[in-house]
Image (cartoon, rainbow, N blue to C red):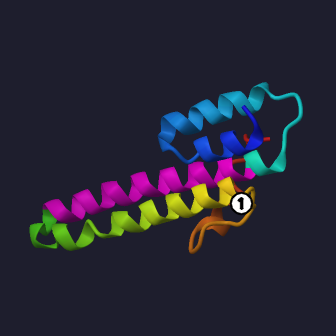
Amino acid sequence: MNKKTLSIISYITIIGWVIAYVNYNKLTVKDSLTRFHLKQGLGIAILGIVISVALTIIAVVVPTLASILSLVNIVVLVLWVMGIINANNEQEIPVPIVGKLFTDKFDFIK
């Protein structure tokens, strides 16, 4: 797989991220584009899980807020789509709002 394909796959669920990460580690020459999108994809996935768990807890406590709070998950979906678009265009642009948080994290991705 080439760097563009790996970058795009890294955003498609945790399973896609694992596939991209394993294939990235098999490469003899590591590129910054794939590394950048692996970090962004993992960060957004973790953020999505944390938000979903928090919203589920809030919805259990206050059921009337469940439908309104479910709209927050759409924000995570939009971030994923923006990441995929940046990967498709081969750009290293962090996703809005939270993307800069993930550029320095996840040092195990080298």
- Image side of residue 3 versus residue 42, left or right: right
Image quarter of residue 93: bottom right
Nearer-the-camera pick, 16 or 57: 16
Where does the C terminus fall, quadrant-wise? top right
x%, y% of residue 47? 48, 57
Nearer-the-camera pick, 74 or 98: 74
Magenta span includes 70: no
Span highlighted in magenta in the image = 36-60
Q: Extreme front residue here? A: 89
- Image side of residue 85 versus residue 68, left or right: right
Nearer-the-camera pick, 87 or 59: 87
Q: Extreme left residue here? A: 64
Q: Residue at x 88, y 28 (%)?
A: 28
Looking at the rendered structure, the kind of residue marked 1 is Thr
Magenta span includes 50: yes
Asked if 26 appears above or below 14 in the picture, the reply is: above
Predominant secondary structure, magenta span: helix
Asked if 98 appears above or below 46 in the picture, the reply is: below
